[in-house]
């Protein structure tokens, strides 16, 4: 293994750490965007729910209007028939039917008045809800725009950071890069840590005297006996 240049290795680690931080930020953006899009969808669904309540009452009112019209037509038909019948029992039967229709009409009209009041209340609630929910949507859309701009910025920064890392890697010998990359694949950055008072600055376990000696010399890579991180003598 070639002579170690700690400055180059530490520079690579610093730039690699910045690249990883940018990648983590970039990975979090799609989740944030999805969360905001879900909130926008929920607000729009709430608007549609409020609108459906109002329209449902309008449909109920229309149905009552049809019931009133149908009952009035039946009552009119019975009155016409009364003019044609000659028997008292038939006349009384038609009178009963007319009275039944008139009672039904009165009930429908009362229900219609109640529904008309409910429609006015539903319209008011819808107007208030629509204004509030649209304001919420507008705020979420502004956040979405900002996040997408941030995502584009991070993508640019990540690409630039990757180029800087590539330049730093070019200054480190291949055999030392293999050691660096092997350790970097494991969780728990950084790769290079100080050794102080005989202990590794990564896992904080005691290193062997030989590892401490090699780290002190600094002309070859020394790795922790426990976590295998590259240990650097802390002067």
Image: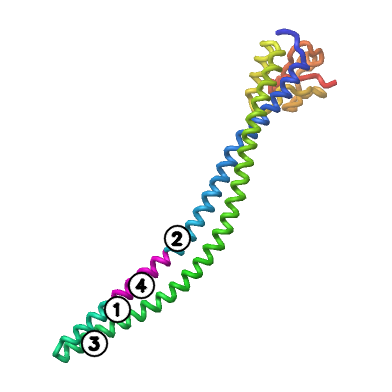
Left or right: where 59 falls relative to 93: right
CA gap between label 4 and label 1 equals 10 Å
What span is in magenta? 56-71
Tag in front: 2 or 4: 4
Is tag 2's residue or tag 1's residue first in the polypeptide sequence? 2
Report how far apart the C-alphas of labels 2 and 1 lie in the structure.
Answer: 30 Å
Q: Which mark is residue 72?
A: 1
User: Is residue 93 part of the magenta span, yes or no?
Assistant: no
Residue matched to label 4: 65
Q: Are marks 2 and 1 in contact (CB under 8 Å)?
A: no
Mark 4 and mark 1 lie on one chain; the one further toward the N terminus is 4
Q: Residue at the spot x=54%, y=59% of the render?
A: 130
Instruction: Please tell me which residue is depicted at 81% across the width and 24% down the height of the picture.
Output: 196
Query: Depth-wise, is mark 2 or mark 1 nearer the camera?
Result: 1
Residue assigned mark 2: 52
Calculate the distance from the C-alpha at mark 1 to the C-alpha at mark 3.
14 Å
Q: Callout 3: few (<14), some (14-19), or many (20+) C-alpha neighbours within 10 Å?
A: some
Which residue has dot 3 on it? 95
Tag 1 secondary structure: helix
Compared with residue 132, is residue 235 higher up or lower down, i.e. above or below?
Answer: above
Q: Give the x, y percent position of residue 151.
A: 62, 35
210, above or below 185, in the image: above
**Residue 121 at what x, y percent from top left?**
51, 69
Residue 173, percent from left and from top: 70, 11
Picture coordinates of residue 29, whole percent (x, y): 61, 37
Q: Residue visible at 65% across and 34% down?
A: 25
Front-lying residue, 221 or 123 = 123
Give the numbered dot on residue 196.
none
């Amino acid at each position: 293994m070639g002579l170690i240049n700690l400055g180059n290795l530490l520079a690579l680690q610093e730039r690699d750490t910045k690249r990883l931080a940018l990648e983590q930020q970039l990975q979090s953006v799609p989740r944030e965007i999805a969360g905001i899009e879900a909130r926008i969808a929920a607000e729009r669904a709430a608007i549609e729910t409020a609108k459906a309540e109002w329209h449902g009452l309008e449909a109920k009112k229309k149905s009552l209007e049809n019931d009133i019209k149908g009952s009035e037509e039946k009552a009119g038909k019975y009155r016409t028939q009364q003019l044609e019948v000659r028997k008292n029992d038939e006349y009384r039967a038609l009178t009963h039917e007319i009275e039944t229709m008139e009672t039904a009409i009165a009930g429908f009209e009362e229900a219609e008045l109640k529904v008309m009041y409910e429609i006015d209340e539903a319209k008011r609630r819808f107007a208030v809800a629509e204004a509030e929910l649209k304001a919420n949507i507008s705020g979420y859309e502004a956040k979405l725009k900002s996040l997408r701009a941030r995502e584009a910025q991070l993508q640019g920064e990540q690409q630039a950071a990757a180029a800087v890392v590539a330049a730093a890697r070019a200054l480190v010998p291949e055999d030392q890069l293999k050691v660096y990359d092997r350790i970097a694949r494991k969780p728990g950055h950084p790769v290079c840590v100080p050794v102080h008072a005989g202990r590794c600055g990564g896992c904080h376990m005691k290193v062997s005297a030989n590892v401490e000696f090699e780290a002190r010399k600094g002309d070859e890579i020394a790795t922790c006996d426990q976590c295998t991180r590259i240990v650097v003598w802390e002067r």
